[in-house]
Image: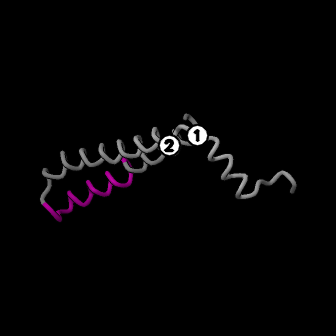
Amino acid sequence: MKNRLSLSDYRKKARASLAQQWGINAWLVFLSMFIIGIIQMIFEPFFSSGSTQQQIFSFFLENFLLFAFSYSLYYIALVVV
């Protein structure tokens, strides 16, 4: 049980890992939100507001594309950068 890290050790490790990387991660989050907003602006006018097609499209967009962006952001923040 001696090899377990305390919360303060995790915080120190996270700070050391993210040193000089906060700006990159913030821009990646902003960019993903911007791209999702652009995609919504492009495709939402094709469907009438409140229609089944619009709800299905919103569901797929939010659950699959948002998940893909979120997962890639976590991967970039924790592994790549």
Q: Residues within 10 Å of mark 2 (few under 14, many from 20)?
A: few
Residue 72 shows in the view? no
Read off the residue under disc 2: 22
Residue 12: image x %, image y %? 68, 49
Q: Is residue 8 left or right of residue 70?
A: right
Q: Which residue ends up furthest to the right in the rendered image?
A: 2
Q: Which residues are magenta?
A: 49-65
Read off the residue under disc 1: 19
Residue type (three-letter) at the residue carrying disc 2: Trp
Quote the CA–CA distance across marks 1 and 2: 7 Å
Is 51 a magenta residue?
yes
- Asked if labels 2 and 1 touch by Cβ distance under 8 angstroms, the answer is no
Q: Is residue 6 left or right of residue 14?
A: right
Quarter of the figure with residue 7: bottom right
Q: Nearer the viewer, residue 27 or 73?
A: 27
Is 40 a magenta residue?
no
Quarter of the figure with residue 31: top left
Residue 78: image x %, image y %? 57, 42
Residue at left offset 34%, top offset 54% = 62
Q: How is the image coloured?
A: one colour
Residue at left offset 17%, top offset 63% = 51
Q: Nearer the viewer, residue 59 or 39?
A: 39
Quadrant where the C terminus is found in the figure: top right
Q: Residues within 10 Å of mark 1 (few under 14, many from 20)?
A: few
Residue type (three-letter) at the residue carrying disc 1: Ala
